[in-house]
């Protein structure tokens, strides 16, 4: 398994469509935005098979990780953890000193295990309860 940066958005978009739109019911209009053009996209590959993705943003010393998803067939393998840790490492290499993400409430324990702490109230994002979480790099 490798995690690479990609500018070809076909595989990240296919993964996001499968997980967010088809599986979780996120409205298509809410999944796609103009931010993809400025993001760094990570893609996890097993050989030629894309299994996970995340997108990164640098905002001064703050890094942001979003649109993290893992194909159903690869869940429970540690791939989600690997994507987050790789995202943190790449953001730190770009000068970030802290990283923030919007966690689905049901996944907060997962992110807490990676050193993230909640920094605000629960809010609705595309019909799914979320909470912003942050950690130092």
Image (cartoon, grey):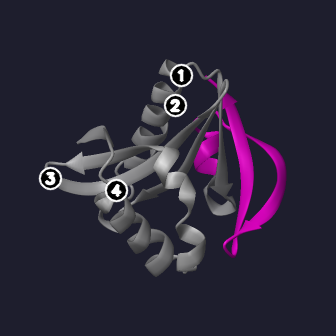
Contact (Cβ within 8 Å) of mark 4 with mark 3: no
Q: Which residues are magenta?
A: 109-137
Q: Earlier in the sequence, mark 1 or mark 4?
A: 4
Residue at image point 47% right, 26% down: 89
Q: Which residue carries the number 3 mark?
A: 48
Real-space CA distance between mark 1 and mark 2, rounded to the nearest whole angstrom: 6 Å
Q: Which residue carries the number 1 mark?
A: 92
In this picture, residue 5 sits left or right of residue 111: left
Real-space CA distance between mark 4 and mark 3, rounded to the nearest whole angstrom: 15 Å
In this picture, residue 9 sits left or right of residue 115: left
Residue at the right extreme, as displayed: 121
Q: Which mark is residue 129?
A: none
Expressed as whole percent of the image width and height from the top left, the position of residue 85 reads 47, 33
Nearer to us: label 1 or label 4: 4
Count neighbours of disc 1 (C-alpha within 10 A) and say few if under 14, some if 14 to 19, many if 20 or more.
some
Main secondary structure found in the magenta portion = strand
Real-space CA distance between mark 1 and mark 4, rounded to the nearest whole angstrom: 23 Å
Q: Which mark is residue 9?
A: 4
């Amino acid at each position: 398994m490798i995690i690479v940066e990609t500018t070809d958005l076909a595989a990240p978009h296919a993964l996001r469509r499968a997980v967010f739109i088809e599986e979780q019911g996120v409205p298509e209009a809410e999944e796609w935005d103009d931010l993809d053009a400025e993001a760094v996209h990570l893609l996890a590959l097993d050989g030629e098979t894309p299994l996970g993705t995340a997108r990164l943003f640098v905002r001064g010393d703050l890094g942001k990780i979003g649109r993290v998803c893992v194909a159903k067939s690869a869940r429970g393998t540690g791939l989600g953890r690997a994507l987050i840790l790789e995202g943190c490492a790449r953001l730190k290499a770009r000068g970030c000193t802290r990283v923030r993400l919007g966690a689905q409430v049901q996944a907060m324990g997962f992110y807490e295990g990676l050193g993230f702490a909640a920094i605000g109230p629960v809010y609705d994002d595309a019909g799914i309860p979320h909470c912003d979480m942050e950690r130092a790099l």
